[in-house]
Every structure is written in C-alpha cells, then in structure tokens.
C-alpha cells in the first residue's frame, strides 16, 4: 500500500518536488508552510501545522539541496524547520511521521565522501556528511541520534537517507522504509527541537 507524503523543500528545489508529484505520482499533500503561526505556545504551533499542513500524511519527504543547510547564509530556514518539527511531533491525534531525506544531485559530493578505515574499530565506515553545513538540525540530529560507539547502523537512525537517482528508480521502497521507522525502537529517541 502507498503512504501519503508531505514534502518539505526550499522553493529553489521545486522542480524536484514537481517531479515527485507529477512524474512519480506519489500520493502527497500539496501544501507548504509559508506564513508563521502567531503563537508562543509550542504545542499549539505543532498541532496547527499538523492539522493545516501535514494532515493525514505519515511520511515527510525532505529535499536536501544547496539551500537547506542550518548554516546557509541568507536563508530563512524557519519553515522547513517547523515542517520537520511538526513531522516529528507526537500529538494527541497523530503519531510522528517517518522522515525520508532525499539528497539532490548537486549535493552528492558535499555529503558522500567515500569510506575510511576507523581508528577505533578497524572496520571501514562510509563518510556521510549530514551536519549543519548540509542540513538543518532537525534532520541531522534524528539521522545521527547520539549514541555510544564509533558508527551508526541502519537501526540507529530514524531518518532515512537516499540519493535522488536511487529514489526515482523505486520511490515506494524508500517511502516504506521511512514509514516503518515509526514503529522501530529508535523512534523513541527522536527529538522535535534539537
Ligand atoms: Zn569504527
């Protein structure tokens, strides 16, 4: 079965969003947060975004492009941050969404840096730069959830990460992976506002 998706993206990357919607025909809610919610009550803000934007989606697709980093200069990240926070929010009428991060082609070199032999365990680890220079904290924290040890396995992460080229070959596979994380043990360790 297919799971309804919400897409969190920067307007600069809207061609990819349109491709997901129109070419890949993913069942999705076509809304983006574009006005601030006027309240100081954090729970209210989260509930409101859930109700008015994320609605009955169960997976949030997050496009990772050149303008979506925590440290991006001259970028207002408040909307994508709020969208991810509301996605991670367990409310009265909803459970958190799974999060699928799609790395757009112009970010491959910045994020995937090959592999390196670890000086602690002697095994080879993939170097995946998910940090403030590539994504917002809401994504990086829930991708590299703090733990002991020198590396993260698939079970240690809540966010699912995929390259755009792999995603388009089999979108449902990755959407399902993100969806299934909602029932995994690691889903208890996510953070809404890291
Ligand atoms: Zn290691």
Image (cartoon, rainbow, N blue to C red):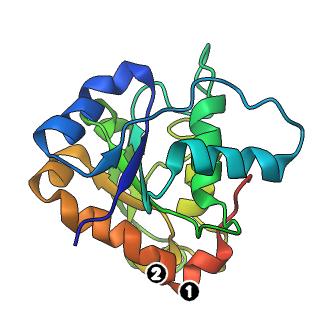
Count of number-bearing discs? 2
Residue located 60% across and 49% down the image: 51
Against 1, is 23 above or below? above
> Residue 185 bears which disc, if any?
1
Foreground pick, 93 / 75: 93
Mark 2 or mark 1, which has the lower sequence index?
Answer: 2
What distance separates the C-alpha of mark 2 from that of mark 1? 8 Å
Q: Secondary structure at mark 2?
A: helix
**Image location (x, y in percent) of residue 27:** 26, 52
Q: Residue furthest top?
A: 74
Mark 1 beta carbon near ligand 1 (under 8 Å): no
Q: Kindly tell me whether residue 149 is visible in this rendering.
A: no
Q: Residue furthest right?
A: 40
Mark 2 beta carbon near ligand 1 (under 8 Å): no
**Image location (x, y in percent) of residue 76:** 63, 21
Decide: few, some or many residues near mark 2? Use Cα within 10 Å; few <14, some 14-19, many ≥20: few
**Image location (x, y in percent) of residue 73:** 61, 17
Give the residue at mark 2: 155
Q: Position of 126 compared to 77: left or right? A: left
Quarter that holds the N terminus: bottom left
Q: Quadrant of residue 115?
A: bottom left
Q: Residue furthest bottom?
A: 185
Q: Kindly tell me whether residue 193 is visible in this rendering.
A: yes
Residue located 56% across and 36% down the image: 80
Question: Which tag is nearer the camera, tag 2 or tag 1?
Answer: 1
Against 146, is 64 above or below? above
Q: Secondary structure at mark 1?
A: helix
Against 125, is 127 above or below? above
Q: Are marks 2 and 1 in contact (CB under 8 Å)?
A: yes
């Amino acid at each position: 079965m297919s799971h309804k998706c919400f897409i969190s993206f920067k307007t600069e990357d809207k061609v990819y969003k349109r491709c997901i919607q129109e070419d890949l025909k993913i069942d999705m809610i076509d809304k983006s947060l574009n006005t601030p919610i006027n309240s100081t009550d954090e729970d209210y803000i989260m509930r409101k975004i859930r109700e008015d934007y994320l609605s009955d989606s169960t997976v949030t697709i997050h496009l990772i492009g050149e303008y979506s980093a925590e440290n991006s200069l001259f970028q207002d990240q408040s909307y994508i941050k709020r969208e991810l926070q509301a996605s991670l929010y367990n409310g009265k009428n909803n459970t958190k969404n799974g999060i699928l991060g799609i790395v757009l082609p112009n970010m491959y070199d910045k994020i995937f840096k090959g592999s390196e032999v670890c000086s602690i365990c002697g095994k080879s680890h993939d170097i995946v730069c998910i940090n403030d220079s590539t994504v917002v904290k809401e994504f990086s924290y829930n991708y590299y959830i703090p733990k002991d040890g020198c590396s993260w396995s698939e079970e240690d992460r809540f966010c699912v990460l995929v390259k755009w080229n792999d995603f388009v070959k089999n979108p449902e596979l990755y959407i399902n992976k993100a969806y299934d994380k909602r029932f995994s043990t690691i889903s208890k360790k996510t953070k809404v506002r890291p």
